[in-house]
Amino acid sequence: MLEIAVIVLAIALVIALIALVLMRRAGLAEVEAAVLRLKDEQGQSNERLEREMRSAIDSAASQTRVETGARFSDLQSSFNAQAAQLSGVQTQSLNAYGQTMQQQLADLTQAIRSNLAEVRTTLQSQLQTLQQGNEAKLEQMRATVDEKLQATLETRLGESFRLVSERLEQVHRGLGEMQGLAQGVGDLKKVLGNVKTRGTFGEVQLGALLDQVLAPDQYAMNIATRPGSSERVEFAVRMPGRSGDGESTCWLPIDAKFPSEDYERLLAAHDAADPVAVETAAKAIEARIRLEARTIREKYVEPPHTTDFAILFLPTEGLFAEVLRRPGLTEALNRELRVVIAGPTTLFAMLNSLQMGFRTLALEKRSAEVWQVLGAVKSEFGKFGEVLGKLKAQLTTASNTIDQAETRTRQMTRALKDVEALPVEQATRLLPPDRSDEG
């Protein structure tokens, strides 16, 4: 490219010199015409030169790209070949190293297994020999101890266990009965939590409550509680602690009263919001209750044939609440006439308390029997403890004998450690077994 440019410049200079010469020789017009021609020729030459230069540049650039691509391909192929060769060498090296390590590990594992097998065999043989010797010695000592203790131990233990079994059977029977009584007490507690009374008024409701809580033999109906009197109370509870005949039974009188007319007037006064009528009806109820309480006291209470108090039962909770509202009424009746006012809920609680007392007395009676059985068992256990003490002493002596025999055995083993053992046949001939031991 530089050479072509130099040539072009040289041609231009030559043309210029020619033009100067011509200008000097010819006239100005000729010179201008020549110059114009030279300019045209120079323009054409420059265009041709430019085309040639562009063509040369494109040819050189194309050749350069081809050469560069070829060299890059060669370089890449060479790099890939070297990488593949290096990878193959590394793979071969790693495979050879892995095979060497595996072979070494296999050899080491085999050597360890062989050593462990030898050690295990040696230990097993030694342990088996030691175990056989110990078992033989212990079996001889055990036979000796069994012969001395078996008969005495079986006789005494059999007798002791028989007595203990009999006593425990009695205790189980007593505890079973106590469990039944305790279950009955639990049923009573459930009844206390949710009570559905039966009947509506007076005697019917009172009988229903008694029948619901007490057993039939624990109360009576229409009974004369005072000796020589024809007055009969509606219901009376038979108190525990006396014999069952009618002459010596202690009764708790319970009589139901329901002043319905006075109570209806009180309810009507409340509905009418008449305080004067309410007070009048309440006073009438109070007077009626006092009269009925005095009647119960005079007709049915006679200690010691009865309790020193009686119960006046009011069949509705509303009437019972109105009586409780009267200031000092219940306290005065209890203090002066020994009559307790009770509504359905209150009487139910009282009857349940009595029933609990009845069951408690029954439990106390059964408890006394159980305590007697337990006392007998305790005595037998004392004897059994003495037998166990004697057995413990005998077993301690036998254990000490075994320990001494083991000590002597270890001493003899240490003393005979350096002595060479004879074969079994020779040892049998020299030390024949005792015939009595075989028998």
Image (spheres, rainbow, N blue to C red):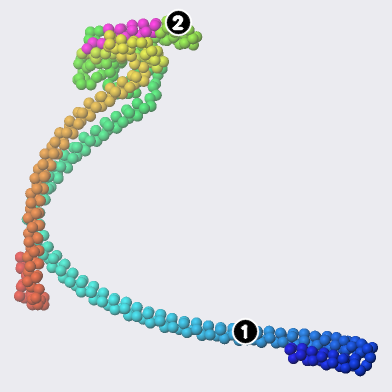
Tell me the CA gap for discs 1 and 2.
Answer: 130 Å
Mark 1 / mark 2, whichever is N-terminal: 1
Q: Pick whichever, 65 or 322, lies toward us.
A: 65
83 relative to 260, above or below: below
Q: Which residues are magenta?
A: 283-303
Q: Identify the residue shown where x is 38% and y is 82%.
A: 100
Query: Which residue position holds label 2?
Result: 276
Q: Position of residue 53 (x, y in %)?
A: 77, 87
Amino acid type at circle 2 is Val
Where, quadrant-wise, is the C terminus in this rendering?
A: bottom left
Residue at 20 percent across and 31 percent down: it is 367
Picture quadrant where residue 375 is located? top left
**Residue flagged by tag 1: what amino acid is it?**
Phe
* Residue 90 spot, x, y in % from top left: 46, 82
Kindly identify which residue carries mark 1.
72
- Residue at point 34%, 78% (across, down): 105
Task: Please tell me which residue lies in front, 205 or 356.
Answer: 356
Q: Is residue 67 visible?
A: yes
397 is higher (above) or lower (below) than 163: below
Q: Is residue 416 left or right of residue 294?
A: left
Q: Secondary structure at mark 1?
A: helix
Image position, residue 431 (x, y; %): 5, 73
**Which residue is located at x 68 percent, y 86 percent?**
64
Q: From this viewpoint, is residue 222 visible? A: no
Q: Is residue 16 left or right of residue 283?
A: right
The image shows residue 229 at horizontal and vertical percentages of: 25, 7
Q: Quadrant of the N terminus?
A: bottom right
